Amino acid sequence: MSFKDDIEDLGETADKQAKMWKVYEGDICTYWEDKELTVKPWPGVPDPSCLAGDIFDIREKLDEHIAALVQMNAQRQSLPFRTDFQEKMGLLSGVADIIDRWVKVQNIWSGLISVFSGGDISKQMPTEYKIF
């Protein structure tokens, strides 16, 4: 391999690294920098307990960004950024897991509300009704 080939390879590597970092820092990190989940009270429950707002858009963006990080992390040019990419993947995966669990609990909760708000359950199981 000649010096010219080495220089071209170095230039291509630097270009790919710059593009990766731009996606990481400019798209992914910037997007999550000030993103907040909306939590509102459930009807009849005074404390905020229900995920609301654009939760499905947030979940979709989490999947998109995790996939982008996995793809970038697999490239040989990502070596200088692997720690950053892996930390962000871990953080975003953790957030996605929490949201999935929260939505699952919220769905179960909404089903139980109709059961416990009915007259029969509150009369047959008054202690459990109060706890719920």
Image (cartoon, rainbow, N blue to C red):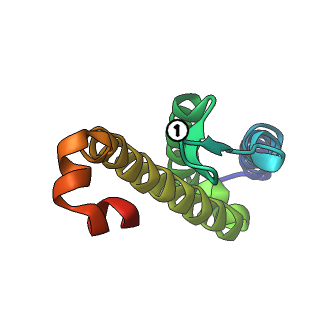
The residue shown at (74%, 52%) is 6
Q: How many dots with numbers?
A: 1
Confirm whether residue 132 shows in the render. Answer: no
Kind of residue sitting beneath label 1:
Arg
Image location of residue 44, percent across then percent down = 53, 42
Image location of residue 98, percent across then percent down = 49, 58
The residue shown at (29%, 69%) is 127
Image location of residue 91, percent across then percent down = 61, 63
**107 or 23, which is in the foreground?**
107
Instruction: Indicate whether 41 appears above or below 91.
Output: above
Confirm whether residue 66 shows in the render. Answer: yes
The residue shown at (77%, 51%) is 10
**18 or 110, which is in the foreground?**
110
**12 or 68, which is in the foreground?**
68
The quadrant the C terminus occupies is bottom left
Residue 90 image-quadrant placement: bottom right
The residue shown at (82%, 42%) is 30
Residue 86 image-quadrant placement: bottom right
Residue 47 image-quadrant placement: bottom right
Residue beneath label 1, please? Answer: 59
Instruction: Indicate whether 129 appears above or below 83.
Output: above
Q: Residue farthest to the front?
A: 123
**93 or 71, which is in the foreground?**
93
Secondary structure under the numbered disc 1 in the rendered image: helix
Q: Is residue 29 left or right of residue 39?
A: right
Image location of residue 111, percent across then percent down = 28, 41
